[in-house]
Amino acid sequence: MPVAAQVSFRLDGPEFEEGIPVLKLTEALKQFHSTVDKGYVSIVGKERITHLDRTFYRLTATKIGGGSFYSDIQIIVPAAQFALTFIPAGITPSHLWEVVKNAFAFLKTVASMRKEGKEPKVQVMTSADTTRLLVIGSQNNIEVNHIVLNTAGQAEPHIKSLAVESVNFCK
């Protein structure tokens, strides 16, 4: 039986008052999905998701609302990972979501520093703690786990696209 984590995904803005082009909506969903996929491949140590991965790992939309676009999205991974040699033990939907959120926070922190004219100094932590993103003082130092850094690097174009689409996702 797979395990799932649920996140909320919302698109809103003035376009929703008269209807939003379906292509714009599907592109935003595609970019969100790609962002989460980059977290998955970073955690499992692959370059891309295989057909076999898709058999067990997926995102599904539920509770789709109107007036804006709102949906709960479930991140589903297999529960019996120890039997599946292609998935590292310990990956959970919550773990994956923490990696994705921290990749977003990392990119946001770097962009904010650069906007202020400061060049961030990134230190990659060797710790396995992927939930840790630390911004240190006025020295423009950022400590980030290698999995979060890898996810941020791979997901950056998707996250930028989502920012343009005014996406709000949270847990």
Image (spheres, helix red, strand yellow):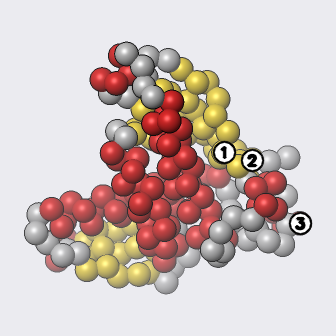
Label 1 element class: strand
Q: Secondary structure at mark 3?
A: helix
Q: Relative to 96, does residue 87 appear above or below in the rendering?
A: below
Q: Which mark is residue 59?
A: 1
Q: Is residue 125 visible?
A: yes
Relative to 128, say whether 2 is above or below.
above
Q: Is residue 169 above or below residue 104?
A: above
Residue on which disc 3 sits: 83
The residue carrying mark 2 is 3
Work out which residue is located at the far left of the displayed protein and give it: 117
Instruction: Choose the circle earlier in sequence order: 3 or 1.
Output: 1
Residue found at x 39% / y 66%: 133
Q: Position of residue 105 (x, y in %)?
A: 36, 58
Kindly indicate whether the residue at mark 1 contacts the one at mark 3 (C-beta within 8 angstroms): no
Residue 36 coordinates in the image, percent (x, y) = 56, 55
Seen in the picture, residue 74 relative to 105 is either above or below; the reply is: above
Amino acid type, residue under disc 1 in the picture: Leu
Mark 3 to mark 1 CA distance (whole Å): 21 Å
